[in-house]
Image (tube, rainbow, N blue to C red):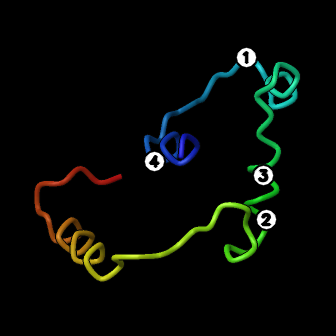
Amino acid sequence: MCLGAIYWARPKIVYFANNRQDAADIGFDDSMIYEEMKSPIEERKIPIKNMGREAALKIFEAWKNKSDKTEY
């Protein structure tokens, strides 16, 4: 979600100090996340279920038709 928020915000540049290995070295290992993203949804360790899509699509349609929105 953080990476998605960064890309949706469209900054001109992102600065960072530590890399993935630095974080893993102190116990913040996120390699499992990268491995999970390669797996089909139905094979992931945490179940991911789709629900309420029809209602959510109505909200997206309202956003799409909104005349005073900020385009991203």
Residue, disc 2 = 38
- Callout 2 crowding tier (Cα within 10 Å): few <14, some 14–19, many ≥20: few
Question: Which circle's residue, 4 or 2, is located before the other in the chain?
Answer: 4
Task: Please provide percent x and percent y for residue 72.
Answer: 36, 52
Residue, disc 1 = 17
Please state if 62 lies on the left or on the right of 44 as rendered: left
Residue, disc 3 = 34
Splitting the image into 4 quarters, where does residue 37 fall? Answer: bottom right
Whether residues under marks 3 and 2 lie with C-beta atoms below 8 angstroms apart, the answer is yes
Task: Please provide percent x and percent y for residue 64.
Answer: 23, 69
Please state if 57 lies on the left or on the right of 30 as rendered: left
Q: Nearer the viewer, residue 50 or 6?
A: 50
Q: CA distance from mark 1 to mark 2?
A: 26 Å
Q: CA distance from mark 4 to mark 3?
A: 20 Å
Looking at the picture, which amino acid does disc 4 mark? Trp
Looking at the picture, which amino acid does disc 3 mark? Tyr
User: Which residue shows up at 54% across the image and 40% down it?
Assistant: 2
Label 4 element class: helix
Looking at the picture, which amino acid does disc 1 mark? Ala
Against 59, residue 8 (above or below) is above
